Amino acid sequence: MGSALVKEPMYQQLNGHLRVLVTSGECAVGSKFLTERQICERYGVSRATANKALSNLVSEGLLEFRKGVGTFVQGQALDYNLRALVSFTDKAISAGKQPSTQVLQFASVAVKDVLDEVPDILEARAGDSLFYMERLRLADSRPVILERRYVVAKYCPGLTETDAAGSIYAVWLQRYQLPIEFADESIRAVNIRGSDARALQVRDGEAGMLVTSVGYLTVRRPLWYERTLYRGAAYEFQNRLTGIQSESIAAGKFLDIGEGPI
């Protein structure tokens, strides 16, 4: 018995039409998008269907809702590259956006005054100093990243707040010629709340990503530790995965089922 074709729900079909409209270039980035009424008239759907489709595209980051004003077309999402260290400045420029940075805090702090696990992670000694910086990164004047970072001062003496207002990666590589080798990162979904939500100009509780990272110089010398909040709708992950394999195969192990590996 043959299987019948299942038709997509109306709002999903409408999502597809509106997604094409947003990404086709017919609607300029930053321009006001169709209202619910205009969508109803153009596609012959109900207000409830139009509202649901618009809400989906807002959650995908293609549209932005501004209370009391309307819905506007977002630009290209910023790429979060999972395979390489790329500066925010370069990411924003490659996405056709103008990057800028607001330095909210910049200070040299003694290791003894840092009361959490950061000194141990950075293998800092009692007499060492760390730079602490808190930066709000913006793309086309829109806050997208709130970064809190500690840096081992002995590797970049004389670092200034002015340096922190641009690409720290560029300063490390060009002025200090630091051999940055890799970074270990963990990424998890969070709800952005309180002062963090206000800084990123999002609703309290809006979805975001928290990236915790430790960057290393050659011979596994820690250089920085950071906890950075990413505005969820502004970023998308980019990665390439290899072929399917089980955890046991990846570890070089096989299950004994009588006839060897499968």
Image (tube, rainbow, N blue to C red):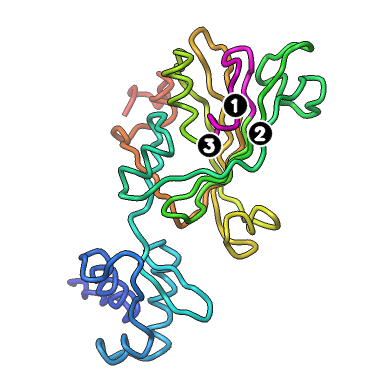
Residue at mark 3: 165
Picture coordinates of residue 60 (x, y %)? 41, 62
Q: In this orientation, which residue lies closer to the viewer: 231 or 127?
A: 127
Displayed quadrant of residue 48: bottom left
In the displayed structure, 170 sits above or below 6; it is above
Where does residue 135 sit, x and y in percent of width and height? 59, 41
Is residue 63 found left or right of 216 in the rendered image? left
Quadrant including the C terminus: top left
Task: Left or right? Give the position of 84 relative to 203.
Answer: left
Q: Which residue is mark 1?
A: 160
Q: Which mark is residue 106?
A: 2
* Secondary structure at numbered mark 3: loop
Residue type (three-letter) at the residue carrying disc 3: Ala
In this picture, which residue range is highlighted in magenta?
Answer: 150-164
Q: How many angstroms separate mark 2 from mark 3 (CA)?
A: 10 Å
The local crowd at label 1, few if under 14, some if 14 to 19, many if 20 or more residues have their Cα within 10 Å, is few
Three-letter amino acid code of the residue under disc 1: Thr
Mark 1 and mark 2 residues within 8 Å of each other at the beta carbon: yes
Instruction: Measuring from the top left, give residue 217's x and y in whole percent.
Output: 51, 14
